[in-house]
Image (cartoon, rainbow, N blue to C red):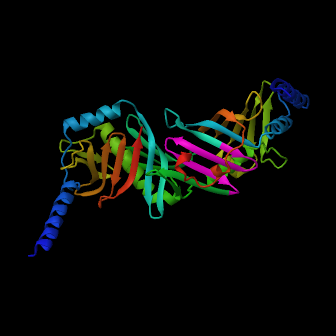
Amino acid sequence: MTARMTILAFLACCAAACRGAPAAAGAVNADSLLQAYSARISRHNQFTARFRQSRHLSMFDAPLVSEGTIVFRAPGDVRLHYTSPFESVILFSGGTFSKYFVENGVWTHQPSLEIVTKAITREMTRWLSADFAADFPYTAHASAADLRRVVLVPRNAVAKAVFTSIELYFSPTAEYIQKVKLVEGSGDSTVIVHEAPAFGPVDPALFRRPGAPAER
Amino acid sequence: MRSGVKRVVLLCCAAGVLAAGCAPRATFSPPTDRQLSRLDNRLDARNSYTGYCDFVLEDGRVRASLAIQVASDTVRALCTDELGMQLGHVVATSGGITVERAFPPLKKTMVATLGYVARAYHMVAQKRFTDDGAYTAPLCGRLWLAVFAQGREADSFLIGKEETPLYAAKFERQRIFFMNASGDTILFCHIR
């Protein structure tokens, strides 16, 4: 099937989601839409992209920007390799979370301090694998005006205390999540943009402790 | 005295002289106009700085992103982890230091060191110096910004209470080293 045909097929799924829409004008059945995206994204078991993370804080004039590479392997392995503001790696693999940074040219394990970071990394694997199953702990919202944007509102009060909403922006080809916006109750937000995606096989060693100089 | 013993004694004396010469002297002298001007040039160019800093804890070193924002009478220093979660946030004003947030495992070190980062920038940004180099912040007591007496680094300063330097802040190009009274670097900041 050509790329154009798959996009057309996907849009047909989206249209089906719109037909199941509630009475509100412009609203669509977001759950059906998510299922359509899930079917499309889950065709790829592995995903690599560059990312740019912008943290927008009301108390700072300019956003705090980090950049790096993300590698994902279904069902639940994710590796975030930050290259700025300093080189570090966050690994979430086999249910284990670990962090490393480079010190004097050597990868050094550092204690993970923030339990919220672990939770967010776990949630990232859910989005990346398009695991929008029935036990999905969010209420999804979407609008016919922009089918590429789905807004997730946490159902859990504890999760809500961290993020009031999570906005997912799917790529035009619906093959991956192009942008994620995490919005906090204070109005502060974090935007993560994925660029130059690739879906080929990734080196399993990437999900182990970094150490080989060649990897850098 | 045998020559070998004499050589050892001489080496020890030389090492002692060198150590004394390199160590920051715990006496305060005011920064010169030229030194303040150099820091002014560096700080006035913009009002926000980002980078990273290392916190040395008993069980290892933790690296965090660092952001500093200088406003009219406020300097904020914020540390976050890679995903942007706040680990520590302190605000320095002429009224003193306020801790907005400090993540428990880092609290003690974070409050002290981020406080000094913010304070150091506040000192320079606000130019609240007396003629003898003192900086006064009502809630912090009388603090001093003084030049390393023997330091060849023109941007090296001691920060601390009068006659009891708690920390030394050594400003280099894009780098600040905060040291305790023993000379150990307890916080390293790399500023872009």
Q: Measured from the top left, where is residue B173 in percent x and y?
A: 33, 39
> Would residue B94 be seen by someone viewing this image from the given angle?
no
Which of the 4 image quadrants contains residue A187? Answer: top right
Question: Is residue B27 rendered to the left or right of residue A198?
Answer: left
**In the displayed structure, would residue A51 be above or below residue A212?**
above
Q: Measured from the top left, where is residue B178 in percent x and y?
A: 34, 52
Could you say which is closer to the camera, residue A68 or residue B118?
Answer: A68
> Would residue A124 be seen by someone viewing this image from the given angle?
yes
Residue A78 on the magenta segment: yes
**In the displayed structure, would residue A54 be above or below residue A78?**
above
Magenta stretch: dominant secondary structure: strand
Residue B106 on the magenta segment: no
For the view shown, which residue lies furthest in the left direction? Answer: B1
> Which residue lies at the image location 65% right of the left edge and 37% below the top edge?
A49
Instruction: Report the magenta residues as a range.
Output: A71-95
Q: Measured from the top left, where is residue B107 in percent x and y?
A: 47, 57
> Which residue lies at the image location 49% right of the left edge and 32% below the top edge?
A61
> The C terminus of chain B is located in which quarter?
top left
